[in-house]
Image (cartoon, rainbow, N blue to C red):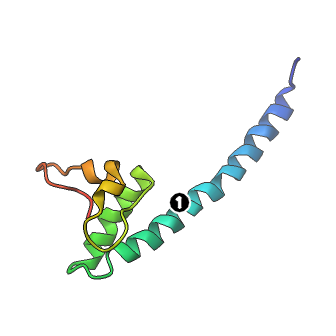
Amino acid sequence: MKISFPVLVCFLLLSSSLMEPAFAATSSYCSNKCSTRCAVAGVQDRCLKYCGICCEECKCVPSGTYGNKHECPCYRDKKNKKGKPKCP
């Protein structure tokens, strides 16, 4: 079976445009989860920043505003340059 070049290009363009909503959904998911996670944080902007980074990489955020990191091992195990937990 031989596929012509224009058909292949159309297929690639169409498939890439269909993937974008999945990334948008992840961002919305992370935004909502991190808003909950950081609701009582002392430095909320920093909490939201690092929670967002961790959520995008791990695809999960522990429930509640503190603890429960066993629910998301990737989130739990991320460390900063000093070896301390990166994710709030």
> Which residue is identified by label 1?
26
The residue lying furthest to the top in this view is: 1
Q: Is residue 30 left or right of residue 51?
A: right
Q: Is residue 20 left or right of residue 13?
A: left
* Residue located at (34% from left, 72% from top): 64
Q: Position of residue 12 (x, y in %)?
A: 74, 39
Rendered view: 74 above or below 35: above
Q: Is residue 76 left or right of residue 63?
A: left
Q: Within 10 Å of the Cα at label 1, are there few (<14), some (14-19), or many (20+) other Cα atoms?
A: some
Rendered view: 30 above or below 13: below
* Residue located at (25% from left, 48% from top): 77
In depth, the one of 13 and 35 nearer the eye is 35
Q: Position of residue 17 (x, y in %)?
A: 71, 51
Rendered view: 68 above or below 84: below
Residue 88: quadrant of the picture: bottom left
Q: Look at the numbered disc 1 and give the secondary structure of its residue.
A: helix
In depth, the one of 57 and 9 nearer the eye is 57
Residue 87: quadrant of the picture: bottom left
* Residue located at (29% from left, 76% from top): 45
Give the residue type that dot 1 points to: Thr
Q: Position of residue 1 (x, y in %)?
A: 88, 17
* Residue located at (46% from left, 65% from top): 30
Q: Position of residue 73 (x, y in %)?
A: 32, 49
Question: How many numbered callouts?
Answer: 1
